[in-house]
Each structure stands twice: as structure tokens, then as C-alpha cells.
């Protein structure tokens, strides 16, 4: 009788599971820490990274917000909310996160 040959499927290293879990937990903790308070007037809005700047501006404008400034990332905008329902409208327009704008002020501003 012939020997059976098994072809093993390629597997990723065991340490990669821990690295992915560490990265995801860091993202969740950062999202909860930097989250904008419901009573805030000015927020930084993060839209999907594959959106163009035009799509991000249109989505923010459709949520009835006023633009305060842009950042180095075209899908990260700082806007002023008209009322308390502004956060809900931003999420309905496609925003992933709304965060406190001071947390991104030092890192993601355009120079020049």
C-alpha cells in the first residue's frame, strides 16, 4: 500500500494572533477614550479612508454642520454641530467616529 501524503495548509504564526488582538484592543480603547461628548459643539469626524475628500465634505454638509478646519487626512474633518442631533446625523451620513478635536490637533494639522 502507498503512503498517504498530506499537504499542510499554510498557517500564520501563533504570535500574530496576539499581535492582532493587541492592536484591536488599542483601537477600541482609543476610540472610547477620544469619543466626543454628546454636549460638545465642535467635533473631529472620521469618515471611511477610501472616501475622497469631496465625499467626506458632502457627507458632513448633509448632516447640517459647519466646517471649522481640515486636517492632513482628507477624510478627517473638524466641524461645528448645529444641535444635539448633529452626532446622530453625522453617523447616518457615514461617519465612523466623532472624537474630541483637541486630541488630533497636534498630530494631524496641515503645515504651510
Image (spheres, rainbow, N blue to C red):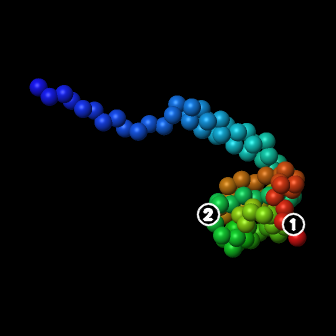
* Left or right: where 101 falls relative to 54: right
Residue plotted at (34% across, 35% down): 8
Q: Residue at x 87, y 66 (%)?
A: 111
Q: CA distance from mark 1 to mark 2?
A: 23 Å
Mark toward the viewer: 1 or 2: 1
For numbered disc 1, what is the local secondary structure?
loop
Residue 33, quarter of the rendered image: top right
Q: Residue 35 in the image: x percent, y percent?
A: 78, 47
Q: Can you name the residue that lies furthest to the left here?
A: 1
**Element carrying mark 2:** loop
**Label 1 neighbour load within 10 Å: few <14, some 14-19, many 20+:** few
Residue displayed at 65% across by 60% down? 49
Closest to the observer: 107 or 28? Answer: 107
Residue at the spot of label 2: 50
The image quadrant where one finds the C terminus is bottom right
Find residue 25 and report its image quarter. top right
Residue 57 visible in the picture:
yes
Rendered position, 30 above or below 15: below
Going by the picture, which residue comes out furthest to the front?
2
Packing grade of label 2 (10 A; few <14, some 14-19, many >=20) is few
Residue closest to the eye, 78 or 38: 78
**Residue 70 position in % (x across, y down):** 81, 67
Identify residue for label 1: 111
Residue 51 in percent (x, y) is at: 64, 66
Which residue is pictured at 70% across the width and 68% down the height? 56
Q: Earlier in the sequence, mark 1 or mark 2?
A: 2
Rendered image quadrant of residue 27:
top right
Q: Nearer the viewer, residue 19 or 10?
A: 10
Amino acid at each position: 500500500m502507498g503512503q498517504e501524503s498530506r499537504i499542510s495548509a499554510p498557517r500564520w504564526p501563533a504570535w500574530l494572533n496576539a499581535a492582532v488582538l493587541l492592536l484591536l484592543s488599542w483601537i477600541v480603547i482609543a476610540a472610547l477614550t477620544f469619543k466626543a461628548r454628546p454636549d460638545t459643539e465642535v467635533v473631529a469626524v472620521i469618515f471611511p479612508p477610501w472616501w475622497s475628500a469631496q465625499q467626506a465634505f458632502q457627507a458632513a454638509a448633509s448632516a447640517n454642520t459647519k466646517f471649522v478646519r481640515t486636517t492632513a487626512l482628507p477624510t478627517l474633518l473638524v466641524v461645528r454641530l448645529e444641535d444635539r442631533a448633529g452626532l446622530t446625523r453625522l453617523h447616518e451620513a457615514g461617519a465612523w467616529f466623532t472624537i474630541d478635536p483637541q486630541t488630533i490637533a497636534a498630530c494631524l494639522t496641515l503645515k504651510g
